[in-house]
Image: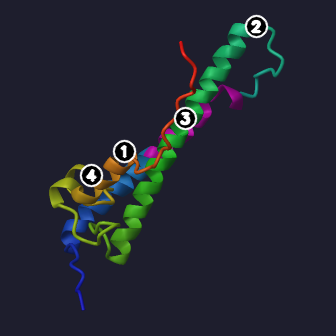
Amino acid sequence: MKSIIQFPSKLLTPIREYLQHEQMKLMKSKSELKREDPFTDSQRVDDNADIGKEAAEQFGHQRSEALRSEVDKILINIRKTLTKIKIGKYGLCEKCGKLIDTDRLAINPTAEFCMDCQKKSVATVRHPATKMKPKKPSGRKL
């Protein structure tokens, strides 16, 4: 039976506190982004006569939505990491189950994969092993 190596709690406490602090900052940032969204302005009129103003509001809304989406992704990663700390699986690669290097975790506390698995994952995304059928010549002369 393979034993799971866990980080000592005195090492996990500062990581947990850091992630909780980041979580609070991001939640505050998300609510600020929501307030900045032109579509949440109660004074906004749906039938703007000025095309420039309408375009600026559309751009502002899309920007706000994109930023909130990115903040949501980071918050999900933080929550997953805090859960891993709680259940004793922090620092284990999600693919191979080996320990993630502590230097990697120091730089990115929410890292999910060891470097080997991360490299394989990136290589797969960049060069998917898809079989493409070669195009047949059309027979036309140019």
Q: Is residue 36 above or below residue 19?
A: above
Tell me how the rendering is colored: rainbow
Query: Is residue 38 shown in magenta?
Result: yes
Indicate which disc residue 64 carries.
Answer: none
Indicate which disc residue 119 carries.
Answer: 4
Closest to the observer: 55 or 139? 139
Residue 109 in view here? no
2 or 3: mark nearer the eye: 3
Most extreme residue toward the bottom, as rendered?
1
Q: Is residue 45 left or right of residue 34?
A: right
Q: Which residue is mark 2?
A: 50
Query: For the residue labelled by badge 4, is the local secondary structure a helix, a strand or a loop?
Result: helix
Q: Is residue 84 above or below residue 59?
A: below
Q: Is residue 58 left or right of residue 28?
A: right
Among numbered discs 4 and 1, the one appearing first in the sequence: 4
Among numbered discs 4 and 3, the one appearing first in the sequence: 3
Tell me which segment is drawn in magenta. 26-40
Among numbered discs 2 and 3, the one appearing first in the sequence: 2
Disc 1 crowd rating (10 Å Cα; few below 14, some 14-19, many 20+) is few
Disc 4 crowd rating (10 Å Cα; few below 14, some 14-19, many 20+) is few
Q: Disc 2 to disc 3, how far (Cα)?
A: 25 Å
Residue drawn at x 72%, y 15% is: 54
Q: Decide: marks 4, 3 in contact (CB < 8 A)?
A: no
Q: Which residue is mark 3?
A: 66
4 or 1: mark nearer the eye: 1
Q: Disc 1 to disc 2, how far (Cα)?
A: 47 Å
Q: Which residue is mark 1?
A: 127
Query: For the residue labelled by badge 2, is the local secondary structure a helix, a strand or a loop?
Result: loop
Q: Is residue 133 above or below residue 39?
A: below
